[in-house]
Each structure stands twice: as structure tokens, then as C-alpha cells.
Amino acid sequence: MSAPLAPAPPTAPSSPSSPRVGDLWRRARGPVAFIAVLFVLALLLSLGARDPREGRLEPEGPNPEGSRALVQILQDRGNDVTVARTAAAALEAAGPDTVTVLVGTHRLPRDQLDSLAEGLDHRILVQPTTPALKALAPGVEMTGRTGEQSLEPRCGLDAASAAGTAESGGEVYTAPQSAGCYPAEGGRALVHVIGESTTTVLGSAAPLTNDRLDDDGNAALALSLIGERDVVWLRPDPVPEEGRSDLWELVPQSLRLSLVPLVATLLLLALWQGRRLGPLVAERLPVVVRASETTEGRAGLYAARRSRDRAAAALRSGTLRRIRPGLGLGPDAAPDSVVDAVAARTGEDPGRLGPLLYGAAQSGAADPYTADDRGLVRLADELDRMEGHLR
């Protein structure tokens, strides 16, 4: 018999190994692929999307002043709405059974307004300009504005009567032989003119805007004015800039020609005033001027102007400046203190010293020393005598 086999020695437990790169990729490739697909889809959608137009009475605008809500209501009701950005496109889309809503008429030149007047049978003008009124609604004139917002129709027009009160307050108009609704001070906010073509002039944009469409009878008024007809909504794009002119080109030619003699005059004036009258005189600085010359010069000016009050003030100011330190007073001492101190030192009457030192400001009456030149000389002598007593 063979000997039994010895049991195999137990193996040591293997230590856990770190995950390899392949294992990590197999775990993460699912979420990475999902995120990559989402990114590609978002990129494709963003390439095909465009920002909606926004602006006042913009038929595609979701902004509060846009008219997208009214356009969608018309389309849901069965009206075909065509948005035109030029007068030519509006004329091409318009027909006998369509109504054209014109907004932003300030962007239309006169020739395009004339072509629209000839080619449109039914039109609604929203706050038109004066040239647009003359071309598309002859006889209608804007007479002002009203501060009222909600107005009553008070007319026999079926569209206005069905809508009732509406936020039609804004511009008001007058027109002979036409139906006018929503009266206000100075005119009516809605004018309906029937002739070779039918024209409705609306003085407020509120009934057509997104944020005011559901107020009062705004929606009913807008829908009733349009009726069952298809709509051509004309909101012209801004006229592209075809060139720029600099400031010099905008100046009239007559003004440009007048600049030539003006420049020549200025040059002659500069040559005349800038020419030398002689060689420059060299003078050593600083220049010493005697005090007597300054005093005599100032005295001459006072004498020429007969400014005896200024001369007296100068004499008194000099005297006070010299005597105050000897009296133990500062420069801001009160006049009464100075007069009392001088009277105590000289023994003179304070009632006489006040007018002598301070003139009319102290006595409250006319200065006796500035009536004539002799009084001014007497003032100088008495001030000199008093100052001698104080030494």
C-alpha cells in the first residue's frame, strides 16, 4: 500500500490589489457615454435655435410690450397672420380680404407710405406719425394726448361697442366725416375712416400688447377691429446704415466758406498784437522801492478819487496798530477798551477820543474829519499829537 499523501501546506491569503485602468474604464464608460450624448443633443438644439425678437408691438415678441399673445389668439381662431418686415413684403401679402396692422410707421419713408396708401384696402394704424396720417388717413389730425387710460366707447362702431371700456387712452385725433370712438379731451382715441379704403387709427398700443391684452376690453377691441379677415402685420425693420458722414461734411458750405476770412482776420490780429514794440529792458531783481514813493503813490490815488474816508481809515489803522501794544491790548481789542485805555493814559475826554480813533463807527454820526481836505489834515495832526503823549 502506498503511503497517504501529505496535505498541501496552507497558502497565505493574498492581499487585495488596486483596480486597474481597464476596470475603471468599464465602470465609467456608461455614464460618460450618456453625458456625451446629452452634450451633443444640447449643442445641436442650440445651433438650430434663435433668440425671439423683442420690441414694442413685435408680433413674435414674448416681452410685455410685444404682441405675440394676440397673434397666437388670431392663429388659434383661424386667422392667417403674415409678418412683414418691409413695405414691399406687406403689399405682396395683402389682398382684398386682408387687414394690415401697421406699427412703427416712423421707419417708413414717404414714398413707401404712398405705395401702401395705394395698395392696402383695409389697414389699422397704431399711433402713426404725422406723415403716415397724411398718406394713409387723409383728413385725420392728431390734436394731443390724454392722461386717461380706460375710456368708454360712446359711439356706434360695432367693434368698439362690443369691446366696451378699453385702455385706449393715449393720442387723440379729430377727423371730419368719420366715426370716432373713445372720446377724451381734445379728440377721440379711435377714428374709423371709410372711403376708397377703410382705415382705423388707434391712439394707444395697450390693447395689442402682451401684458395689457387681458385688461378691460382690450382683447375684444383688438379682435373685433381685425374681424374674420387674414392679417398682415407690418413692423418695419430699422433702415440699415448705408454710410457715415463726418462732422465736416455736415457743416453747410456757406459756413465753411465764411471760415476763410475769419481765420485770416485772426491771423492778422495775432500778428498785430504780437509784434514787438522795442527791445526788452533788462532789470535787476528784486527792485527796491522806497517807502515814501509807495505812500505818495497811494496818497495820489486817494486824492484823485477823493477817497478821504479810505485815507482816514488808513491813518487810524496805522495809529491803532502802533499804540495797542504799549497799552497792553491785543489786535482784537474792542474799541471801547482802546478808548478807555487812551483816556486813562492821556487824561483826555473819551467822548472826543472815540470819533478821533474810530470815526463815524464809534460816534454813530457823520465823520467830522472826512468832510474836506482840511479835516483830514487836522485828523493826521491830532493823531500824531495823541501818539506823542503816549510815548
Image (spheres, rainbow, N blue to C red):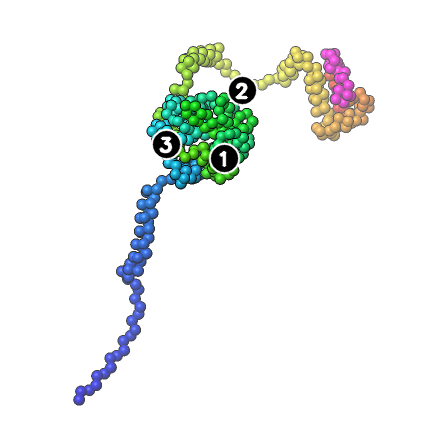
Mark 1 — residue? 162
Quadrant holding the N terminus: bottom left
Side of 82 relative to 166 (left or right): left
User: Do tag 1 and tag 2 residues touch (Cβ < 8 Å)?
Assistant: no
- Where are the magenta residues, as a range? 356-378
Q: Residues within 10 Å of mark 2 (few under 14, many from 20)?
A: few
**Rendered location of residue 249, percent (x, y):** 39, 19
Q: Amino acid at mark 2?
A: Leu
> Which mark is drawn over residue 68?
none
SS assignment at label 2 = loop
SS assignment at label 3 = strand
Residue nearest the observer in this picture, 299 or 200:
200
Residue nearest the observer in this picture, 83 or 176:
176
SS assignment at label 1 = helix
Residue nearest the observer in this picture, 207 or 252:
207
Q: Residues within 10 Å of mark 1 (few under 14, many from 20)?
A: some
User: Do tag 3 and tag 1 residues touch (Cβ < 8 Å)?
Assistant: no
Mark 3 vs mark 1: in front:
1
Q: Please identify the quarter of the rendering in which residue 97 is found.
A: top left
Mark 3 — residue? 84
Which of marks 1 and 3 precedes in the sequence?
3
> Which mark is drawn over residue 285?
2
**Rendered location of residue 294, percent (x, y):** 63, 16
